[in-house]
Amino acid sequence: MTQYMYGKNVVKQILQDSDRIRQIWISSDDRAILEMARKRNVPVKKTDRRTLTKMTESDRHQGVVAEIEPYKTYTVKELTDSVPKGEHGLIIMLDELEDPHNLGAILRTADAVQATGVIFKKTHSVGLTASVAKVSAGAIDTVKCAAVTNLSRTLEELQKAGWWAVAADMDGQDYRSLAYDFPTVLIIGNEGKGISRLLREKCDYVVSIPMKGKISSLNASVSASILMYGINDRRFPL
């Protein structure tokens, strides 16, 4: 399967952090990219912007496209086994999130707080795409992601293994009221529908972010970021 990444910063980040790039197409001489590609022994081909737009189905490639090895996904067990001894893990479970910008931003925050990983569905959900990578600013390479068939079944298995499920939804208790002194699965819902009824019913806690203004909800990635840092702050207070 061929996968393309595009954008100058994205391609530079991949060249800097990994050997995933197979080949680069470029429409203008970017000295930094050309030099980094030379050091990595990555072949570079000159082409025109129209060809790059056709390859990526986007006009936001900034004149550079890279063919890469597909991004690796992990099993849920690999995620849970990676939790350091004596620490409580933090897994972000995404219930049919559809916007690649939301997933990219969530991965970026997950990297910042050193979350255990991110779980999403194989279908009806955004996956590890070029757009996600661009927004993640490299976090797509550093955060372990697991794609599963059934979120409810996956959550049940995690709970049997000692993890506690915390849903982010309206009408929950203040997220600051929990100590999060347990392995935590933080569940973020779909941008429009929120968390499915079946998944919410399986959760141990439902938490909300206090809203004092006239707007009743926040963007999914903003909510996830606030909650991830909130959990991190309660576990590691200054």
Image (cartoon, rainbow, N blue to C red):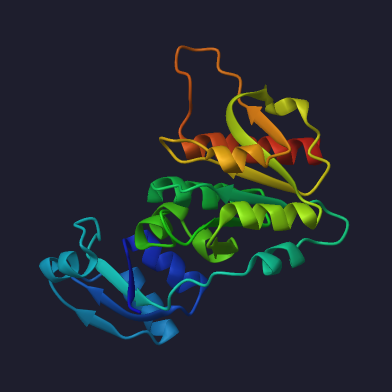
Which of the pair 152/131 is nearer the observer? 152
Left or right: 122 as drawn, with respect to 109:
left
| Left or right of 233, for residue 129 | left
Q: Quadrant of the C terminus?
A: top right
Determine which quarter of the picture holds residue 232: top right
Which residue is at 46% across, 52% downward? 104
The residue at the point 81 percent across, 61 percent down is 84
Count of marks placed on residues:
0
> In the image, is residue 178 above or below residue 6?
above
Residue at image position (46%, 50%) is 103
**What is the x, y in percent for residue 209?**
60, 25
Residue 91 to residue 82: above or below = above
Report the front residue among 226 and 157.
Answer: 157
The residue sitting at 81% across, 36% down in the picture is: 237
Whether residue 157 sits left or right of residue 56 in the image: it is right
Q: In which quarter of the image is the N terminus?
A: bottom left
